Image (spheres, rainbow, N blue to C red):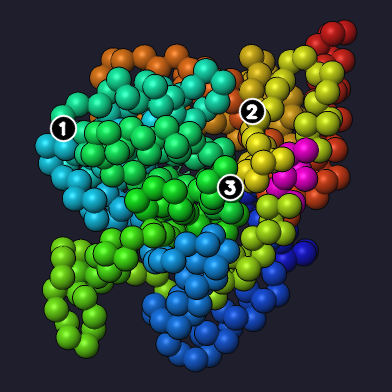
Amino acid sequence: MRKSEAANASFVSAGSEVPFWMTDIGENEIATVVETMAARSFSMGAVTAKMEAEIAKQLDVPYVLCTTSGSMALMMGLMAAGVGPGDEVIVPTRTFIATAHAASLLGARVVLVDSRSDSPNMDVAEAEKKITPRSKAIMPVHLNGRVCDMSAIRVLAEKHGLAVIEDACQGIFSRGPDGYQGTLGDCGCFSFGMVKLVSTGQGGAIVTRDKAMYEKLAAMRNHGVADVVSHTYLTTGHNFKFNDLLASIGLWQVRRGPEKVAHVNAVYKRYREGFEGLSFIELVPVGVECGEAALWTEAVSEERDNLMAFLAGEGIQTRKFIPCVHTAPHFDSGERFPNSERYSRTGFNLPCGPDMPLDYVDRTIEVLKKYEKASINP
Ligand SMILES: Cc1ncc(COP(=O)(O)O)c(C=O)c1O
């Protein structure tokens, strides 16, 4: 078994030959984990600092802090912006619920916004309608590497005095017209979960261009301690630290960023070519020609559930889009979000990832063509 096959074994459901996701774990990751363990000191230290420096270099951002998860990075960003009880935070309903939980766990009220009609990303005009004197922050989520309209968001934020906490958990290495996602607001958050471009199993990072914010976040990561020599308590905080074993994996994952982007975008383009002439399925567009990274290959189809069953019958694993935030009972106010709901109902992810062989993509396209023939001549 190749190393990547072993690493992917947990993603393959029984009977599937083509998994929904294939990550890439190289020899360097394994060798560095062994070295770090052999040094017998692997709490947050020199390797984490190296990984942070590598992220800073690649994303052209001065300040980076690794932490336990993307969810925690989001919460740290909101805490640093002073979000708390009585505040409102603007969040798209089409996101992983972690975005909303980061705000609600701090006691803020989550105000949900629909997607655009032509993209799952948040509709900024709708967001503006939801701003009140209590609004404190806005959380643009760059879904699957698609950059949100950051110039419009910055204008809104300035006009209404909002902090901009970017959720770039699905967008590391993805660029918009003004730079890398996550580096365009007050701070930006990344996830290093298993189905992300940089995977350490668990983990995340928060980045900022603001020195004062960085110092606050750095202290917050260690129970508010400004530095371990003076042990002065600068702010409130908790144990949000990363560790050097995870950084031993992440350092190399970050170094291979450009290669990973090239591969996931090649997968996306292969599907795009293969889908020409298919009427029952469409890719959800990602601007791969403009610097965006298609972390996942996402498609929509009115026949989604039949298609997923047909693919599963041929040994091909796919994954439904996650439901919108407003479907959770604790965020359901009865308001409807028609664009977001359409994506939830029709969207799914095709086999993809930084180590997904293009042969598997071709096989998936062939099976989709077989489905078309079967549905024309049942
Ligand atoms: C948009 C978004 N926000 C936040 C998160 C949370 O990241 P983590 O799983 O690292 O906590 C994810 C994870 O998938 C995500 O996709």
Where, by quadrant of the figure, is residue 241 drawn? bottom left
Residue in the picture at 24% in, 34% down: 160
Q: Which numbered dot is residue 134?
A: 1
For residue 50, above or below residue 156: below
Q: Nearer the viewer, residue 167 or 326?
A: 167
For residue 222, above or below residue 79: below
Residue in the picture at 50% in, 77% down: 50
Residue 68 in sight from this viewpoint: no
Q: Where is residue 335 shown, x and y percent of the image?
A: 31, 15
Q: Which numbered dot is residue 175?
A: 3
State the quadrant of the C terminus: top right
Residue 339 in sight from this viewpoint: yes
Q: Around disc 2, counting alpha carbons within 10 Å, would you say few (fewer than 14), some (14 to 19), or many (20 or more)?
A: some
Give the magenta-colored segment's residue range.
263-269
Q: Tell me the amino acid under the disc marked 1.
A: Arg
Q: Tell me: 366 left or right of 237.
A: right
Q: Tell me the amino acid under the disc marked 2.
A: Val
Q: Where is residue 14 shown, x and y percent of the image?
A: 67, 43
